Amino acid sequence: MNPPPRPDDRAILPSPSAASVQEQAAEFGRPTEGWREQMYIVIFEADTRAGRLFDIALIGAILLSVLVVVLDSVQALNRRYGAWFDALEWTFTLLFTAEYIARLACVRHPWRYARSFFGMIDLLAVLPTYLAILVPELHALIDVRILRLLRIFRIFKLTLYAAEYRMLARALASSRRKIIVFLGFVAMVVLVMGTLMFVVEGPEHGFHNIPIGVYWAITTMTTVGFGDITPKTDLGRAIASLMMLLGWGVLAVPTGIVTAEMTSLRHRPVTTRTCPECLTEDHPPDANFCRHCGARLPLYRTDAAPPDQAENRRNTA
Amino acid sequence: MNPPPRPDDRAILPSPSAASVQEQAAEFGRPTEGWREQMYIVIFEADTRAGRLFDIALIGAILLSVLVVVLDSVQALNRRYGAWFDALEWTFTLLFTAEYIARLACVRHPWRYARSFFGMIDLLAVLPTYLAILVPELHALIDVRILRLLRIFRIFKLTLYAAEYRMLARALASSRRKIIVFLGFVAMVVLVMGTLMFVVEGPEHGFHNIPIGVYWAITTMTTVGFGDITPKTDLGRAIASLMMLLGWGVLAVPTGIVTAEMTSLRHRPVTTRTCPECLTEDHPPDANFCRHCGARLPLYRTDAAPPDQAENRRNTA
Amino acid sequence: MNPPPRPDDRAILPSPSAASVQEQAAEFGRPTEGWREQMYIVIFEADTRAGRLFDIALIGAILLSVLVVVLDSVQALNRRYGAWFDALEWTFTLLFTAEYIARLACVRHPWRYARSFFGMIDLLAVLPTYLAILVPELHALIDVRILRLLRIFRIFKLTLYAAEYRMLARALASSRRKIIVFLGFVAMVVLVMGTLMFVVEGPEHGFHNIPIGVYWAITTMTTVGFGDITPKTDLGRAIASLMMLLGWGVLAVPTGIVTAEMTSLRHRPVTTRTCPECLTEDHPPDANFCRHCGARLPLYRTDAAPPDQAENRRNTA
Amino acid sequence: MNPPPRPDDRAILPSPSAASVQEQAAEFGRPTEGWREQMYIVIFEADTRAGRLFDIALIGAILLSVLVVVLDSVQALNRRYGAWFDALEWTFTLLFTAEYIARLACVRHPWRYARSFFGMIDLLAVLPTYLAILVPELHALIDVRILRLLRIFRIFKLTLYAAEYRMLARALASSRRKIIVFLGFVAMVVLVMGTLMFVVEGPEHGFHNIPIGVYWAITTMTTVGFGDITPKTDLGRAIASLMMLLGWGVLAVPTGIVTAEMTSLRHRPVTTRTCPECLTEDHPPDANFCRHCGARLPLYRTDAAPPDQAENRRNTA
């Protein structure tokens, strides 16, 4: 009856959860005096005014820098504002580099931080821009698009700021086996069905090989249904119909079962249990006394003689 | 065991809920005598015959006026009945203007009503038609289509008539944080996946920039799958498959977990075990004593002789 | 704790439920002697061998006749086997006519049967074929396709044979208001969004009028996503993204909430309640006695002093 | 309160479940001495080191052989590595043949194994390759693609290694009737709707016959929405809208009902009311006496003085 405490359902302002703050202190080594401790308090902790301002500024910078990457990919905007985007990108890169260096400088085990998930994200966030400068030949070989992709990963730093993501990660980890078994089942079905459609429809109808058949099977079973490849033969359409009903049924059948169970539980016929004194109905099976008049209730489900009248009257309100 | 009272599950006739009637009286100021009170009773309250007739007439007028806007957009109908539609539109505009003025006239704080949600809707419902007349140059600048859009908003006045919409609004408000965290997760996934597909497929396959990639990622993750943009490369299709399984799995995996939990709860092997004294059911297989009255329970699944009566009575509460 | 009795989960052989048999007897009037009673027992009841054979034969005839209608619509098959299909169709029509007449003949209130749901289906099942013969000019006016449609309705007679369909109909009827309110919400959303897309995209991109916009909005919100009409402008795609997230979210958000609630209930920390005698944990909040050793448990959630040792020992097994 | 034991939620390494090992021993006959027993222990059981190595090797071989079949279907890869694929395919065929013969050799009832599900899979796994050699004319008649399909079925051998698949099979079997009734309902709807669309749209819009109409109805109701066939008439689109709302609503309406029930159960306004004597919580707002000990409850939601101690004691159980 006491579910685990959950984050305040109304707090929108993001801040690292207490648990993650403690974990980081233990893992990376919180300094205990001097300018390093001051810097640590601002960067890694969130209970001082400076600390919270830092967090909000960092979130703002991450969102803005991601927006710049997104807008820069639009040809029209790139042509008009390309120079501005470059300038902003360099500003952000320098800011994030300073933040990265500051983080490494103020923890006691900088190496552990560099190897952690968020440490890698920090490095990945600034590396592309430097690579483009330091290794100009790279520019010709690697598509600029890939560099944009690496910068997008900055957005994962935001997961630090909501405890729910840690809870979600833990929940997924604990259901690991169930999910793998489920995915294995889906993999087997789409593999067999994909091969079946490849056999039935063949390359002349778009199913050039088994991988394409599997791709089609996934679009069908997950009810996405792009329509770039569709069955043309009667048998193919019949098989497709089975797959569609399977993919949709995996959602619909359990939902129906749960709803049926739930509504039958709610309308359970406890109404048969009646107080002999005041005739109130609807007593739970585990009740001993009438909630309305206090009389002792007959034992559940027996045809025993009603309890002694005197005993009842002594208890009546 | 007594859930909060809910609207009668069979009542179809719409009427403002008691709670909203009280709220309005408090907020806008219910007059207490004279013609203003008479008008208020008809317009804002629903327990007199005139009040209910007003409500039904208003709902009818809203539905009809929205229908006129919809039909007017169909070229063929516009050519044949355009004049009729204009006449009806002016009739409705005048009716709604009269209603708006009446509302403002009979409350004690008209300024508060004008600033409220329904007050704004009322204004928006009549403004377009007047603008089209009073500012004819507007007609050339603003697409008539936009004026149609504003008139469609009249339909939101109907939400006053079903208490469930207020309950829904309150439920959404209280789960505000959960929904934002969930949307944040979805936003991060579609942003990274959209950029990934932009990098992998590129403009030559339809993925012209990151925003288009994100649009595609949303159509795929929500299993809508328009098919206007589809991956053409093998790697692109592999990534698309992962996204489809993710979007569908977010629905399928929890549904499966809930169904498994529910059916295992329902079929847990304890329902057969009953205390001979107090008839409490539902004792775990490893229990020796009744949790309710303390009597000794018969051994699980054996046909052992019932325990000694005297021993049971000593333990009875 | 006692859900209503449900049909045997393993019985596949269809038969009318006991409830429907009684209802029919009361409504239409069961004859009490002679050949009429004999015929009634075979046709309307299912507890004699003849009655069950009749049911199975009827179901077979319905399924076969529907199959004939379906196959007859395929041009290739119609050309090759058209004559056979006609012959079979006439056989079925005569059979169903005989059945209809027999039903009317053996009940005591034939007029009530003719007006009932199944009576109308019976009539609709045979009428088209007679119309095609008796009113030949009709053949030229009414598309043969419509006559096929009417014959397909025979399949609704099968709903008599599974009690679940009656339960489903009753469940839908009792949730009538909830469903209407929900549909009303969906109607408002697709109307406003459809108009919005009509305004934003316009006829040049396929959105010729508001009804088409609403059709598109429904394909998007229900995540079907045909792709026959798709947004082309940036703003249109942004609005489409919101609609897709809304339609998918209506499924995903509640599923997530239910899963979170369910798993937190399952892992509730009742483990804090420990028996002072034998140290067994995990007692339900409503338990008075330890299920393992019978000792009286301390009251839930107080810091009261442990109960008197002697009192515990008196109760120990 | 003790759900049936379930496979360890963290174990990833696959192994046949204890139940299936016992079933196989009983069904096929476990030998009791000599080399046959040694071979049986390695092949059919998993508690020795050799047994587990055999399992892991077999799973690896199955996955690899399926991968070869998949890659071999890609024209580009087939041209470059066709010879390698053939060689690998023959190696796997010989391995699986040896495994099959070993299984038959070491059980006591080889005939029962050959007739079982996994026995048939084993045969089907090796047969195609031999057929292609022994009956060369077959090569010209039967599409090589079909032979690939048969080899893909090897993947079903993996279901032996996860107990969840047996649980899933049992759960499906016990809900057999519910699923058939549900599918029957879906079949009736898509048949009637498919015929309706065939009548309304007709061959000129792609709906050539009723089977195609039914195929379209399934793609729409399961929200897949390929878009290869779409309604073009207004009436057709209206009917399509109803189908889409039905298919999506079958998922959305029950989900909404379950969420509403669940949250109302959790937040029902009774948790605050506690009996002063026995501290039982969860009394309905209208209760006057504690259902557990009979004590008089304080009035709901007032700050009335606690009831007289003496009166309470007289009522205590």
Image (cartoon, coloured by chain):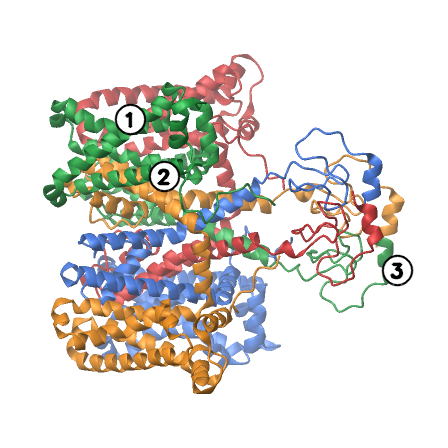
Chain colours: A orange, B blue, C red, D green
Quadrant of the rendering where the N terminus of chain A is positioned: bottom right
Give the total of numbered labels.
3
Task: Name the residue located 21 percent from the left edge and 38 percent from the top edge.
Answer: D69
Of labels 3 and 2, earlier in sequence is 2
What chain does badge 2 belong to?
Answer: D
Whether residue D154 appears in this view of the structure is yes
The answer to whether the residues at label 2 and label 1 have Cβ atoms under 8 Å apart is: no
* Between marks 3 and 1 in the image, the one whose residue lies nearer the viewer: 1
Of circles 3 and 2, which is in front? 2
Please tell me if label 3 and label 1 are on a single chain: yes
Q: Residue at x 46, y 28 (%)?
A: D23
Q: Position of residue A248 (x, y in %)?
A: 36, 44
Alpha carbon of mark 3 to alpha carbon of mark 1: how far? 83 Å
For the residue pair C297 and C237, the one nearer the viewer reads as C297
SS for dot 3: helix
Compared across the picture, whether B172 is left or right of B144 comes to: right
| Label ID, residue D310 | 3
Circle 1 Cα neighbour tier, 10 Å, few/some/many (<14 / 14–19 / ≥20): some
Q: Mark 2 vs mark 1: tell me if same chain.
A: yes
- State the CA–CA distance, disc 3 to disc 2: 74 Å
The answer to whether residue B125 is visible is no
Q: CA distance from mark 2 to mark 1?
A: 23 Å
Q: Earlier in the sequence, mark 2 or mark 1?
A: 2
Q: Chain of mark 1?
A: D
In the image, A214 versus B67, the foreground residue is A214
| Chain to which the residue tagged by mark 3 belongs | D
- Residue wearing tag 2: D53
Of the residues shown, which amino acid type is indicated by label 3? Ala
Badge number at residue D123 = 1
Indicate left or right for B200 with D18 as reference: left
